[in-house]
Image (cartoon, grey):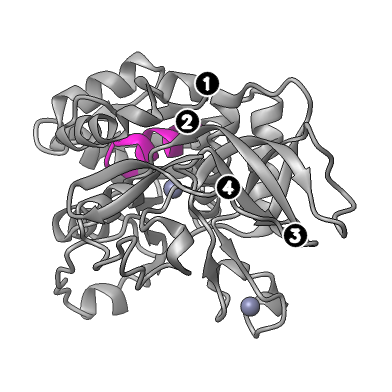
Amino acid sequence: MKAAVFYGKSDIRIEEVPVPEVSDDEVLVKTLRIGICPTDLRYYLGLRGESTYDNPKFTTGKDTFGLSGHEIVGEIVEVGRKVKSFNEGDLVTHETFTYCGECKYCRRGLVNLCEKKIDIARGYAEYVRAPQKFVHKFKKGTDVKFAAFAEPLSVVIHAVRKIPLENIAIVGAGPMGVLMAMYSDYKGKNVLLLETREDRRKFAREIGVKNVMDPINDAGLINSKISSEIFGVVSSVGGKNPIDYALSLSSSSAPVVIFGGTYPAEMLTYDPNRIHYTEKIITGSTDHTVDDMDESIMLIEERKLHLDRIVTGEYSLSQLKEAFDNTISGKEMKVQIKFK
Ligand SMILES: [Zn+2]
Ligand SMILES: [Zn+2]
């Protein structure tokens, strides 16, 4: 089969590699579509350490190809002998990480924080294998373009659940920010989407997001809206500036959710009295739980959100490097790789 193999910063090559062999407990999935996630771009840019095919330090073995690739949807083409709930032909996705189900976090349903998480994502390949426990099925006829949003939508659901308020401000209108705005709007929240880049504000408005504003030129309007209600804030992007901005916007007593990773690392400085006297809740959000994924799949099957509008480009696996480069340069917002 063909797979993208990562050799080092900005160096990926499409190579012929063996089709994975499934164990009794696993399914073999023929990849139909995969979305490019900002996390994958960090691997590609070498910002997640030297996780290459030859030195897969941050992944699980040589068969990971050194890239992530977890926004996957495909069709089951083979099932292991002990697999009961899946059949050939099922349209599925699988979790990015396995979890143990037994540690102190898993026992409380916080499987995203499992102490024994293992990254099994290797979706830039024509076939992937996954343990049945971590596979999710879509109902027949689900559009693969929507289905490839199962993982990003589930992590967005996880983040938005941390703000049990009517009002939410989202900092950053990248692909995750607009997805967060769409989902929050669907949940009936009053949403402000804040973005410094003109092209991204324009894109968000074009796909139907309301209340898209510029933190600089619309500062007065943003402040008047924020000060009239209690607002929780998510920083959908990492970095000192957006997170500082999110902290400054959030209301007393309200959560500030740090959603985007910061690579390379940066330090935040914050007067503790601004937390002490305001009771702001500073928290993070990473991955998703079982409930988040269940809700995501339901929303996808029922086509409750216009997820297809977020996709700006569709490329083939052989064009993966171009797809990564065009996403990094900002030419594309969200790319999906289509497999034959
Ligand atoms: Zn992702
Ligand atoms: Zn665990």
Q: Is residue 178 magenta?
A: yes
> Looking at the image, do the residues carrying marks 3 and 1 touch, with CB atoms under 8 Å apart?
no
Residue at 54% across, 54% down? 158
> Could you tell me the amino acid type at mark 1?
His
| Residue nearest the observer in this picture, 168 or 235 | 235
Residue tagged by mark 2? Answer: 182
| Residue sticking out furthest to the left | 217
Q: Nearer the viewer, mark 3 or mark 1?
A: 3
Residue at 54% across, 24% down? 145
Disc 2 is placed on an element classified as: helix
> Looking at the image, do the residues carrying marks 4 and 3 touch, with CB atoms under 8 Å apart?
no
Residue tagged by mark 4? Answer: 19
Residue 289 rendering spot, x and y as whole percentages = 62, 60
| Residue nearest the observer in this picture, 16 or 134 | 16
* 245 is higher (above) or lower (below) than 317: below
**Which comes sooner in the sequence, label 2 or label 3?**
3
- The answer for how far apart the CA atoms under marks 4 and 3 are is 21 Å
Q: Nearer the viewer, mark 1 or mark 4?
A: 4
**Which comes sooner in the sequence, label 4 or label 3?**
4
Disc 3 is placed on an element classified as: helix
Residue 55 seen in this snapshot = yes
Residue 14 rendering spot, x and y as whole percentages = 34, 39
> Could you tell me the amino acid type at mark 4?
Val
